Structures are given as structure tokens and as C-alpha cells.
């Protein structure tokens, strides 16, 4: 009997919290922090949940111009292995240019954003993302993370 009275007493609060959470989700979805960058032949889109991921997206074509030139030198349907893909700016760029990409990113926050970027650009048929680290040694180890933030790098 006490449980039933308790459930009846908190029912309005439960309803209120559900409504508040639904409103928060709608707000965040409407904010949709996506940054679009024009590239030769189209554009690429990046999910930017923080300043670091926004900076990575914004500097796609300028931060490492040699990497962009190198990717541009590939023929369509060539294969790129992106080791330490982070949030996938180069993986996405390469796939939009027509390459097949295998992207490896061990850090969970970056891996989640990488997959979101693949989805945003509709390149699931050209990019396969793996949530593992690649090394020259067959072993298991630790991933030392300085900052648990999307876009950050492991040490």
C-alpha cells in the first residue's frame, strides 16, 4: 500500500521530468552544430559539439595542406588507411573525393563523432570505422587520454 501511495505521489514529478528531458533533446537537436565546408566538387559536413571539433573542421584545408594535397593525388577508388582518424576530417574528405577509407580511432568520444560525420556525409559505403588502435606490435595496452573531449588527441 505504501508503494502505491508513493508511486501516486511522484507520478506528476516523473511526468514533469520526462517533459523537461524531451524539451532538452528537441533543443539540442534543433541546435544541430554542423559545419559545412565547400570543397572541389561539393561540400563536406562535420558535427561540431565543441570548439575543438569546430576548429578541426574549420581548418580542414589549411592545417595540413600537404595531407590534403596527398589525398588529392589518389585516384578515385584508391584505398586510404586513416590511422588515428580522430573525428574523421581527412577520412570524410577522402571519401567525398571517391576513395575507399578504413578509419581507425581508439578513443570513444572521437569514434562517436567520426561515425556521426560519416553518416552526415552519406558515405557509409566508402568509410569503414574501427574503434581500435593500430600498432607495429601485436599486444594489448592502455590508451592514455589527457582529455575526455571529442576532438582531443590521445597522448
Image (cartoon, rainbow, N blue to C red):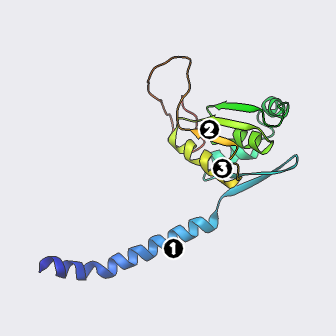
For mark 1, does the 10 Å Cα neighbourhood hold few (<14), some (14 to 19), or many (20 or more) residues?
A: few
Mark found first going from the N terminus, 2 or 1: 1
Closer to the camera, 142 or 127? 127
Mark 2 or 1, closer to the camera? 2
Rounded to the nearest angstrom, the CA distance separating label 1 from label 3 is: 25 Å
Residue 117 relative to residue 68: left or right: left
The residue labelled by disc 2 is 86
The disc at residue 117 is 3
Mark found first going from the N terminus, 1 or 3: 1
Rounded to the nearest angstrom, the CA distance separating label 2 from label 1 is: 31 Å
Give the total of numbered labels. 3
Label 1: element kind: helix
Instruction: Please report contact status of discs 3 and 2: CB closer than 8 Å, yes or no.
Output: no
Mark found first going from the N terminus, 3 or 2: 2
The residue labelled by disc 1 is 23
For mark 3, does the 10 Å Cα neighbourhood hold few (<14), some (14 to 19), or many (20 or more) residues?
A: many
Q: Residue at x 72, y 37 (%)?
A: 100
Image coords of residue 153 (percent x, y)? 58, 34
Closer to the camera, 130 or 84? 130
Q: Residue at x 74, y 42 (%)?
A: 95
Image coords of residue 16 (percent x, y)? 39, 78
Of all residues, the one furthest to the left in this rendering is 1
Label 2: element kind: loop
Residue 29 higher or lower than 91, as above or below: below
Image coords of residue 45 (percent x, y)? 73, 52
Amino acid at each position: 500500500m505504501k508503494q502505491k501511495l508513493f508511486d501516486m505521489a511522484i507520478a506528476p514529478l516523473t511526468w514533469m521530468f520526462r517533459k523537461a528531458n524531451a524539451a532538452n533533446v528537441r533543443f539540442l537537436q534543433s541546435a544541430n552544430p554542423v559545419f559545412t565546408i565547400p570543397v572541389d566538387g561539393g561540400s563536406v559536413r562535420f558535427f561540431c559539439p565543441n570548439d575543438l571539433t569546430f576548429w578541426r573542421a574549420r581548418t580542414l584545408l589549411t592545417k595540413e595542406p600537404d595531407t590534403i594535397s596527398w589525398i588529392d593525388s589518389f585516384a578515385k577508388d584508391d584505398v586510404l588507411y586513416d590511422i588515428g582518424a580522430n573525428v574523421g576530417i581527412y577520412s570524410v574528405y577522402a571519401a567525398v573525393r571517391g576513395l575507399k577509407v578504413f578509419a581507425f580511432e581508439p578513443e570513444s568520444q572521437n569514434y562517436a563523432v567520426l561515425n556521426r560525420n560519416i553518416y552526415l556525409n552519406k558515405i557509409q559505403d566508402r568509410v569503414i570505422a574501427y574503434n581500435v588502435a593500430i600498432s607495429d606490435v601485436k599486444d594489448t595496452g592502455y590508451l592514455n587520454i589527457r582529455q575526455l573531449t571529442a576532438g582531443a588527441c590521445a597522448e
